[in-house]
Amino acid sequence: MEPLFREEREGRRRRDDLRVRRPAWDVTPNGRRVTSSMLTLVLGGARSGKSRFAESLCINARRVAYIATLRPEDDEMRERVARHRSERPAHWLTIEEPLDIASAADRCDAECDCILLDCLTIWLSNLFWCYRGETPDALRALAARELERLVSAAARCDCVIVSNEVGYGLVPESPVGRTFRDLQGWLNQDAARAADAVYLVVAGIPLAIKRPETAL
């Protein structure tokens, strides 16, 4: 089977904004890695800078798979997708998968140093629409099972997951809106519990709220 990635030493694009080499807490005082792989959750509101920061966590990885969950169904979305793709390093592999994110991760984890999934919120909205006839409890169980599968895949390489923090706004007027907000909150809690590290990005500034030595 032909590998997903080719070695590209030249032309690697660098980012100056919000760039980090590797989280300092990824090593112990004696220089050893805390874990063989890292699962990192990056939370934030709309236009908070969460996606840019998440990309900066992967910038030193040689082989990155970017799992995009957005369905570009209109001109605005297609333009946004094209802009985001042009801003990412050219050698990153992009996988468009709106629903089966765990299988997407399984397909590329052996060939990757890092998987970046952007984002969990759009994936949940896709799931919510696809299974709109199900009860909230059934949707929550379905989302939890898929997240568990994704976490298992992430155990084999570094993985960064982006998700929206939706709990700071007004209470949604519609029952559907309130159900989605609750599902997103529960999903974020599950992801944060599974993650080695969690960041909250506010106005472009990343705040570390969970580190590998911290248990939730």
Image (cartoon, rainbow, N blue to C red):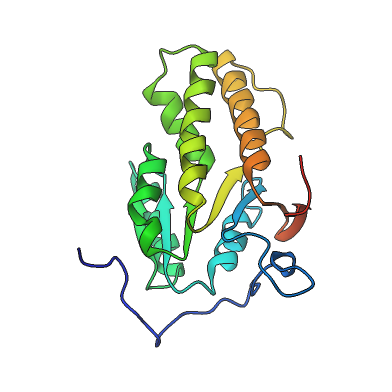
Residue 205 percent location from the top left of the image: 74, 60
Rendering quarter of residue 175: top right
The residue at 39%/88% (across/down) is 10
Looking at the picture, does residue 167 appear above or below residue 54? above
Q: Is residue 25 placed above or below 68 in the rendered structure?
A: below
Q: Considering depth in this image, is 172 or 144 the residue closer to the camera?
A: 144
Residue at the image point whose x is 40% and y is 56% from the top: 109
The N terminus sits in image quarter: bottom left
Q: How many labels does the image show?
A: 0
Q: Can residue 41 be seen in this view?
A: yes
Q: Quadrant of the C terminus?
A: top right
Q: Position of residue 79 (x, y in %)?
A: 38, 55
Q: x%, y% of residue 140?
A: 54, 22
Residue 24 in which image quadrant? bottom right
Q: Viewer-proximal residue, 80 or 141?
A: 141
Which residue is situated farthest in the left direction here? 1
Q: Which of 203 and 95 is in front in this view?
A: 95
**Residue 71 seen:** no
Is 132 on the left or on the right of 190, as rendered? left
Where residue 25 sits: x, y (%)? 74, 65
Q: Is residue 37 left or right of residue 6?
A: right
Classify residue 105 as left or right of residue 201: left
